[in-house]
Image (cartoon, rainbow, N blue to C red):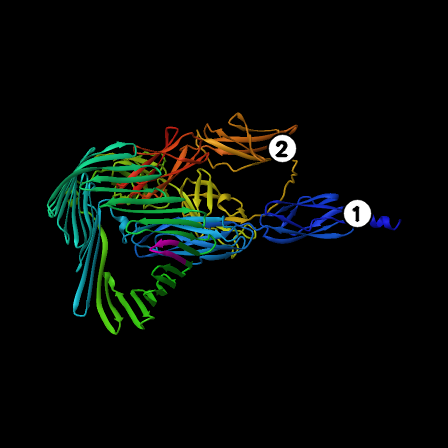
Amino acid sequence: MRTLLPFLLGVALALEAPEGLEAKRGGFLSIPVRGEGTVAAEAPEAFLPLTGQVEGEGLLNFLVRPEARAGEYVVRVRDARTSREVRVRVLPEAGLRLKVPPGATGVEGETLTYTLFLENTGNAPDRVRLEVRTLLPYRLEGALVDLEPGETREIPLELKLTGRNRDTATVLAYSSLDPSVRAYGVVETTILPFAGAESLGRNALRYRFGLRLAYGEGKLGYAVALGLSGSLSDYVGLASGLEWSQEGVKGEASLRGEGFALGFRGYGDYLRLEGEWGPLQAYYAFGGVAPTLGALYQEGPARLALTLSASAQRLDLGYALREGGLTLTPYLALRRRASPEEVRAGGGLEARLEDRAFSLAGRLEYLGGMAFRLGGATRSQEPYGLKGEVAYQGGVWQGSLEGGATLTEEVRASLSVRAGQGVGGRFGLTFRPLTLPLSLQAGLGYQGGVTADLGLRVRLDGLEFGGGLASQPTGSSATLYLGYRERDFSVRTALNLTPSGRTLLLAGEARFEDLEGSLQLGYDLDQGFPEAQGALLYRLPEGFGLGLAARYRQGDLSWQALGVLELKGGFNTPEEVVQAFGGRATGYVEGVVFHDRNRDGVRNLDEPPLPGARVRVGALEAVADGNGRYRLELYPGSYRLEVGGLEATLALRRNVEARVERGRALPLDLPMETVVGLQGQVYLDENRNGQRDEGEPPLPYARVFLRGPEARTAFADGRGNFTVGGLLPGRYTLSLDPKSLGSLQEPGEPLVLELAPGPFPQAVLAARPVVREVVQTLTEESLGLVLRPLPPALPPGAELPLWVEVQGKPERVVAEVGGQTYPLEPAGEGLYGAYLPVAGEGGLEIRVRAFRGSEEAEVSAFLPLRPGPLATLTATPALLDPGEEVRLEARLLRRASRVEVRLGPLILPLERVDDLTYRGSLPAPKTPGAYTLELYLDGTLVHTARIRVRD
């Protein structure tokens, strides 16, 4: 018995601890232990001890450092007798940060290169897939990027500028660890049609001229293209793009003014003249078709339409009735046919319904027989949408229906049905995984029999691979292709297997400086016939080019000599032309640019003028003469004037606003004051020694604060460089905004500079890696407060969303703001908050206090108050085609019961996303021009946004 008792005690007091646990970075790790005497733990560097030891039984608590990498760690637990190992698995967490430049301006035909910065902010190695959504040809170096935790990679993005005036490229990054984790950036690119286009005035004309000659087999072919577009005056615009060749005239030309329009359209053998004068519209079609004259007169709700041709004539008389989005137009019709001779009378009804979610249009007509047509579509196709049409004429019904729906983020379904001469349809699925650069689609349908298809596409950097299989009643077919594209060359090979034959194709294009070439090789596997064709073009200066094209097929070789001439440019419309077409609707701002030495804003006798100063409003500019006088021609409206072209020590510090009226001159002198500035660079002080050492990298896109006689904010560029000018002389403090840095970085020591007139000094501002220290250990029972981030600033009249995380189960939590006390209500486990009114000037002191018995915890903050709107309205995109969908998002600074957007008489209620976010969409107007969207909160106008509809 005496020997058994110590044995039982030893078993009872054996060290107990779990074999394995899981933890998250930045979270807490608690290890329950029981042993003999003092129980302590030896933990790796990734775990910061909070409870170092316990007596007998208890919890060993650790803080998992935010920089701890995912993986398995070993914590050794010891008591007075023995030790045990506890394996702790830190769970992987994905995190991405993508920084992109704001954009640039280039000329059509050029290639712009942007540098993207992709950072892995997670705690585990991640393979990131990058996707670019743009309408321009592009090349991205590294569609799949492997990143270690904390690693940042520079990724070049090349965009080939084609014939557009603006492009928005959206870059998306997807994590392979967690598909829900993603980052994105938007790059805006402005594309000029030719070099120097930005310097043209409001009334300017752009021209394009092209000539192509081809000689081969004794025949001469030609094609002449001419385009002239722009503004003839403030009231008349011209647009044209025509091409003449052996096939006839193709293209369009139009002349538009206030209340009138003239136009021409050519489509080979079909030619058409169009005109519009007030309520009257007319056209005349001729060429390879029977000459036809049509006219439409519409004044208010009344409408009269006439169509005349050699074979038939028709007259329609209608009257439109409108109620909201519904328009009904009953009409009478009279038709005469020449062969066979007949005259018929009848009528019909046209209907159109425009709703925020869908549109419908239809016609029911009886004119010697019944005819019916109805079509419609939902305005948005995401996350689901429908469009279709049904028609009946001559005793025959026809119809079609197409629909699509997004089932998940990766899967989209589509359905199409057709009926009429035959019945057919298809149901398809498209799968695009977020973490892989591929797409897969499959479909099953009926078209005279059962059909099925399957397609695959993989795109990685410039490499593209894909193929498809299809089964139809006529047989089965397959396609397989492989291609590679760089900026200056591309190659592609394809194999096509169809019931009618099998072909192999190899094609390539290349460009080296002024030499361009293309080659295509084909081989018919069934008949054994090779085929080849290619072209080579050498571009000479001034838009000329010479080349040779050849083709070989079934033993026959043909060739052509090519000559090309391409010219494009622009010029300001001659003043004589501007005046002949109505002139300008402008006013003037004029005055003297002078050195305001005493900073009082008024020119004194001893204050000299500044000749050569450049007074600017946007792209418009006027140069001051020898007496400092300037004269700037502007269109009616309010403008902010800026001055450049002077030494960096002189600047216009005042906000000079000019309200221009048509036909009037506004006198306005511009006082230039002596100022100072600085240049600098932001870098990462990796060893935290406060000095710039060799190899320490710059930090791109960091935000720099300047505080002194005045406050400024500057942004570093992609190399970490920044410049600030136009400051008052004095002592300034430079610091970094922590929110613009990475999660594992913090600002270094602020930099103090004494700025005086003279050359700009060079400043170096440091950020450094974060060193985590625990100042106080809180248990779950301790009363503590953590205030969630506040807005940078709010305007008076807004509401402050105040949220605080509270530990320790308080009895009550209150906030003291502006001398008032407000109770905070529970909003979740450990979360309290409320929306508090904001009033006053300058700023608000905020104190949040929690009470539990005699215990009290407190946290405070300061909220700057600045004038501003109570909400902002964002319209995306801002440049649209007629009828294109505009996505609207309103960000509120106070809650509202009714949020709506108004565009003229149209009132669109926005849908609530959360208390301070509302969204909606509407179709862009079909008439080109600029439009203002107004945001109303509970009937009060608070903000506006502008959109422009393309011609």
Residue 140 in sight in this render: no
- The kind of residue on which mark 2 rests is Lys
The x, y position of residue 70, in whole percent, is 59, 52
Identify the residue shown where x is 33% and y is 71%. 526
Dot 2: within a 10 Å radius of its alpha carbon, few (fewer than 14), some, or many (20 or more) residues?
A: some
Instruction: Label 1: state its secondary structure.
Output: helix
Instruction: Label 2: state its secondary structure.
Output: loop
Q: Is residue 911 magenta?
A: no
From the image, give the main secondary structure of the stretch colored magenta: strand
The x, y position of residue 280, in whole percent, is 16, 39
- The kind of residue on which mark 1 rests is Ala
Q: Is residue 447 above or below residue 507?
A: above
Residue behind mark 2: 809
Q: Is residue 565 above or below residue 252?
A: below
Q: Is residue 550 left or right of residue 334?
A: right
Residue at the far front: name it: 395
Q: Which of the two discs, 1 and 2, labels the residue nearer the N terminus?
A: 1
Comparing 16 with 942, the one in front is 16
The x, y position of residue 409, in whole percent, is 45, 48
Residue at the far top: name it: 820
Name the front one of labels 1 and 2. Answer: 1
The stretch in magenta equals 444-455
Comparing 116 with 771, the one in front is 116
Residue behind mark 1: 12
The x, y position of residue 344, in whole percent, is 14, 40
Residue at the far bottom: name it: 555
